[in-house]
Image (cartoon, grey):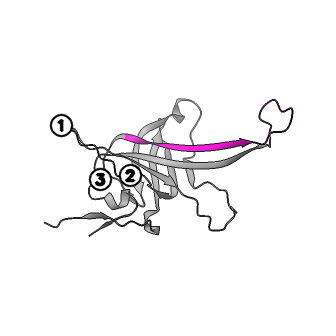
Amino acid sequence: MATITYGGTGQVVTADFKQVKWVGKTKSGHAVTITLTNAINMGNIDWTFAEKDDVVPAVTFEAAYSNTDAHISDTTEPWTVEVADGVSAGAGEILLGSGLFYIGDAVVALTRGGGSFNVARTFREINADDDMGAVKDRVVITESRASITINMLTMMTRVADMYAGISTT
C-alpha cells in the first residue's frame, strides 16, 4: 500500500487558488449554486484531536480578486449566487442547509455541520457638513470579502486541495 506524504512548500502558487462552490436547493426543490472564483484557504491547519470524537476542521476559502494593475479597474466581486428559474415567494424560497461542496469539479466528500457562506463588506459614507446620516449616492464599498466555510469530516486524501502551500510526495 502506498503512502501519501504532505508537506509545506513555504509558497503560495497559482494552483492554490481554486473555484469553490456549494450546490443546494430551496424547499420547493429549485437549485441554488454559490460560487467563489479564485478562492484560497489562507487559514492554518488546525485539527483538534479528542478521544472518542472525529476530527472535523472548519476550512474557509476566501475569494480573491484578479486585478493585476496598480489601480482597481474592475470592482466586480468574485462570487455569485445562482437561483434556478421558477422560485416563487413564500415557503418555496426557503434555502435548505444541506448541499454539496465542490473544489473545482470534484465533490468534497463528507461534511458534518455543513458549512456557511459569508460576504463581509466595509462601507464608507462620504459625509458633508450637516448630514443627518447616510446620504444616497454617497456610500461606497471599500472592501468586500466573500468566503465559504466547509466543516470537513473526510479530508485525508484532499489535504493539498484544502490548504495553500501544501504539496504531496
Q: Amino acid at mark 2?
A: Asn
Mark number for residue 7? none
Q: Nearer the viewer, residue 146 or 23?
A: 146
Q: Amino acid at mark 1?
A: Lys
From the image, tell me which residue sits under label 3.
155
State which tag comes first along the sequence, 3 or 2.
Answer: 2
Q: In the rendered structure, does residue 124 fall within the stretch colored magenta?
A: yes
In the rendered structure, which segment of residues is drawn in magenta?
Answer: 114-135
Q: Nearer the viewer, residue 45 or 14?
A: 45
Residue under the image location 47 percent in, 62 percent down: 17
**Quarter of the image containing the N terminus?**
bottom left
Real-space Cα separation, disc 3 to disc 2, in angstroms: 15 Å
From the image, tell me which residue sits under label 1.
52
Asked whether residue 14 is in view, the answer is yes
Q: Nearer the viewer, residue 71 or 74?
A: 71
The extreme right residue here reads: 130
From the image, tell me which residue sits under label 2.
44
Which of labels 2 and 1 is toward the front? 2
Which of labels 1 and 3 is toward the front? 1
Query: Crowding near pointer 1: few (<14 within 10 Å), some, many (20+)?
Result: few
Placement of 53 over or under 79, stated as above or below: above
Residue under the image location 44 percent in, 44 percent down: 24
The extreme left residue here reads: 1
Q: Is residue 49 left or right of residue 85?
A: left
- Quadrant in the picture for residue 125: top right
Q: Is residue 76 left or right of residue 1?
A: right
State which tag comes first along the sequence, 2 or 1.
Answer: 2
Q: Amino acid at mark 3?
A: Met
Asked whether residue 33 is in view, the answer is no
State which tag comes first along the sequence, 1 or 3.
Answer: 1
> Answer yes or no: do the residues labelled 2 and 1 have beta carbons within 8 Å?
no
